[in-house]
Image (tube, helix red, strand yellow):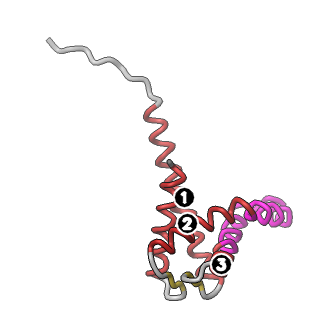
Amino acid sequence: MSWILELLVNAGVILLMAYILPQVTIKSFWTALWVALLVSILSVLIGWILTFILNLVTFFLLEFVVKLIVSAIVLKIADKLVRNFEIKGFWPALVIAIALSLASTFINRSSEDREEISSLPVQPVEAIA
């Protein structure tokens, strides 16, 4: 369920970034949803390979920066694969990658907070006479 929520939020973020950035064009929310799904699949299939190779080059010192760059590369690959989605340049892809990373962090933090609250012990409430 959290994957579906993250997919919908990512589609919304991509649509919002297309509205804000003039270098990004997208046709509809369904195209944004398709791009979010494709970015998710590409991140699983080739993102970890690129991340591993780039982390070897940086000796694992800049892991967060490498993840952002890999996300931007994956977005550019999705740009080439989806007809109604276009990113003109690498910098807008990097801005979208940063926005997606912030949204993902927010979703993961809020789900961790919900898990933490649900694991708290419940004290019985005594009736007031």
Q: Is the residue 9 above or below the residue 111 in the image?
A: below
CB-based contact (under 8 Å), mark 2 and mark 1 = yes
Number of the front mark, 1 or 3: 3
**Depth check, front residue: 8 or 127:** 8
Which mark is first along the chain, 3 or 1? 3
Say which amino acid is labelled 3. Leu
* Label 3: element kind: helix
State which region is magenta: 46-74
Number of the front mark, 2 or 3: 3
Residue 10: x and y, percent? 51, 65
- Identify the image quadrant of residue 65: bottom right
Label 2 sits on residue = 100
Which mark is first along the chain, 3 or 2? 3
Label 1 sits on residue = 104
Residue 102: x and y, percent? 53, 62
* Label 2: element kind: helix
Say which amino acid is labelled 2. Leu
Q: Is the residue 29 above or below the residue 24 in the image?
A: above
Q: At x 45% / y 68%, what residue is drawn?
A: 12
Q: Is the residue 11 above or below the residue 1 in the image?
A: below
